[in-house]
Image: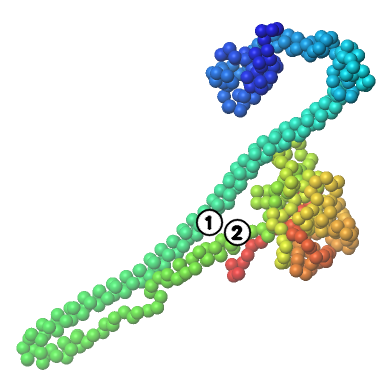
Amino acid sequence: MGSFSDQHLSCPVCLHIFDDPVILPCGYSGCRACVEQYWRVKGERVCPVCREMSAANNPPLNLALKNLCQVFLDHRRHLEELCEVHQKKRTLVCCDDEQLLCEICRLSEEHRNHTYRPIQEVAEELKGVLRSQLDLLTRKRKMMQDAGIHCDCMVDHIMSQATFIENTSKDHLESLHQFLKEEEQAMLEELNQETEQKADRIQEKMLKINEDIISLSNTIEHLEKELGNGDIRIIQNFKETLKRAQCKFQAPAITSGDLLHSAKYLGNFKLNVWKKMRNRFSYSPVVLDLNTACLQLSTCTNLTTISNHEDLMEEDRQEWLPLNRERFADCPCVLGYVGYSTGMHTWDVDVEENTSWMVGVAVESVQRKGTNGLPSGIWCIGHDGEVLSVTDPLESCVLLHGFVKPTVVRVNLDLSAGRLSFSDLLGETVYHTFTHIFNEKVFPFFYNECAYPISILPVVESEEK
């Protein structure tokens, strides 16, 4: 073994003695794990030493080198066991100066009054410490690997979100484009129709004028001829000529509305189109924040309806969702996208078919993970089976008696007055009113434990507004 050293038997990547060495087509070797990691980093299969390309994805084991490394390690381990001074096997550990000793070293003046322990006993204790550290590092590595996998999945989810948003936005914009095309066509048809009508009216006037001009020209020509006749003829024909020369024609009257009204078409053009668009398309006073939705909930593309799919088969459920910080992990609920700090806000929720629901508001700091039931920080009204109740962080759950099961719940939030009330759609029946001054931003809250959906009703503004 004198002709070899650990330098000759070291991997060119990790610089340690070869572990499971593989041989590359160029003749160089490296640890299998080191070569594979080097390839992943480089993005191509090249030799770490000479950079020659390797066609083999799984290079063969260098058995001769592996055996040589094992012999070298065994020999080095044997040398390490011998005392450098007496060449005897070291079997003791000096507890006073932490040196490894052979039996002759123990009898020396330097260690005569020291305490000793067997190497094997001390090694087992130290192995226990190292195993604990190894276990800790292994768990941390597993956590980091899981975090890496989660990040990879989040990237895939972000790309999926981007595709969904792009496709849905294109669909929405296409409907707006179609509306504008229809509006353009209707406006041009109206313009062309009015243009044709008014142009025809002027053309009729022009035809009448031309006819009058021809008639007048004939009369003038006749009168000029009469003036050229002799005096006797003029006297004889005077009455008839004068009668014929009487002008019975009048220029056409200039009337109102003959021209196109530009202001009718161009005045506040964008505003008028927007009013028609607003009257045609509804909007939702609240839209859902998908990033807060519990994993067992699904929503529609317009972000106004939630359903619970907990009972669906795994293959029928929606795509994997990351357990991000905003998301509720245990409670089947979701928040609105916009939170409120001031003002008055109203939204209506259709709960007619659902048998287990809650609607209300939640504070921004509401607990979203690690809860067994409804977390604190929520003010809501709910229905489960045949029971209608209200819940808040202080009074917990209070049953409401004497009310018919709601079909639509109107949520009225007045942050200035510190009042949150629940009523029917017309406000004739008020189920409950909370009085509370909210010191932080609150968000619309929706809970669904039923397969039937609950939906935020749209608002259609009248054109008069």
Q: Secondary structure at mark 2?
A: loop
Q: Position of residue 165 (x, y in %)?
A: 61, 47
Circle 1: is it few (<14), some (14-19), or many (20+) Cα within 10 Å? Answer: some
Query: Which sits in the foreground, 328 or 191?
Result: 328
Q: Is residue 226 above or below residue 61?
A: below
- Looking at this view, name the residue that lies furthest to the front: 109
Q: Which amino acid type corresponds to the residue marked 2 in the rendered image?
A: Phe
Mark 1: which secondary structure?
Answer: helix
**The one of 341 and 335 positioned closer to us in this rendering:** 341
CA gap between label 2 and label 1 equals 10 Å
Q: Residue at the location (65% across, 48% down)?
A: 301
- Residue 104, by quadrant, is top right
Q: Which mark is residue 281?
A: 2
Determine whether 96 is above or below 71 in the image.
below
Name the spot of residue 28 as percent of width and height, x first: 59, 14
Please say if 423 is above or below 227.
above
Residue at which label 1 appears:
179
Q: Residue at x 75, y 67 (%)?
A: 414
Which quadrant would the N terminus be assigned to in this image? top right
